Image (cartoon, grey):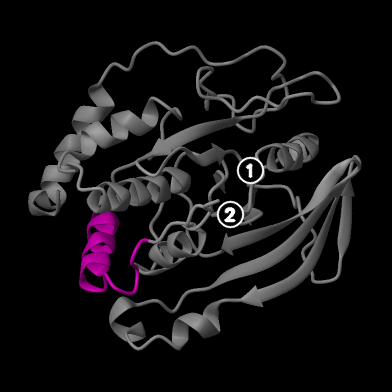
Amino acid sequence: MLSKGVKGLNDEFIALCLFNFPSFPAYKKFCSGRNRYRNVVCLDHSRVKLNNHPTRNDYIHANYVSTPFSERRFICTQAPLDCTTFDFWFMIIQEKVRYIIMLTNFTEKGYTKSTLYFPFEANKTENYNGITVKCITVCLKFEILVSMNFIQQLNTLTLFISRSLVIEWPGVQSMLVTHLHWIDWPDHGIPNSYACPLLLLKMVRISSTPIVLHCSAGIGRTGCLVLIELVLEKLLCKQICSDMSLMLIELRRQRANLVQNNIVLLFLINIFKVFLKHFLFFEIKTEKKKTS
């Protein structure tokens, strides 16, 4: 894939845009007012269904996305709205999620991109229709990145925030969830760090349950990060990953329109170069299964 260069990957992306995807139906029933963007559909066959929801409405704008490591490796979703915050946390509890990665800010260029769906400060608690979310710790990961020996050559002077959240709901055992918020990835653009996505993915890779990933619509920045992990897992599983268009088709069959534009192609190339150069640091590890 790297041997194709930017032009080769760009040609594949253009061909992808001309590809006629199979007509997977988008889910429309009971979703009025629950979609952040009217032109971003939620594919029915792969959508997350909220089981035993108090309102008996099982809809949330979220799709399972598979990788070689797991059939439900990711849940790609839109940023919560005020009216879907309870649904979001209901999904977290249902799917036993341990990690959430947020790739958008709450407002960008004057537009609201996400509601504040968690307590922002440590020792603060919020209640969302009966689901209690308490922020235990807030940690700026800037210091950790600066301590790395190869910081300058990786251009990793970036910032993401890690929060430890305790989720409680009557009748359900409390859960500890790690919320990772990368704050400087611009919408429809590329970030200034090649290592940060690799570091984020390394932190969550041990998860044996779905990793929730969202930007604003849940397709652009979200799709880019999913594509990175898909390539890395294919490499480690010794699977063919020379054709980016085939991988994007594979992803878009699970979450509509993942990876929105070709501006990320050079960014992806540089990320994979960083990974290959510093393989031991970014080595992929999975959670060991318990043996009886």
Left or right: residue 211 versus residue 68 is right
Q: As displayed, is residue 182 above or below residue 100?
A: below
Q: Residues within 10 Å of mark 1 (few under 14, many from 20)?
A: many
Q: Is residue 288 visible?
A: yes
Q: As displayed, is residue 164 above or below residue 140?
A: above
Reply yes or no: does residue 269 show up in magenta.
yes
Q: Residues within 10 Å of mark 2 (few under 14, many from 20)?
A: many
Residue 10, image x, y percentages:
18, 42
Instruction: Residue 66: name its quadrant.
Output: top left
Give the amino acid at mark 2. Met
SS class of the residue under badge 1?
loop
Find the magenta span and give its range.
Answer: 266-284
For the stretch drawn in magenta, what is the main secondary structure?
Answer: helix
Q: Which residue is mark 1?
A: 79
The residue positioned 72% from the left and 15% from the top of the image is 30
Q: Which residue is mark 2?
A: 102
The residue positioned 75% from the left and 35% from the top of the image is 87
SS class of the residue under badge 2?
strand
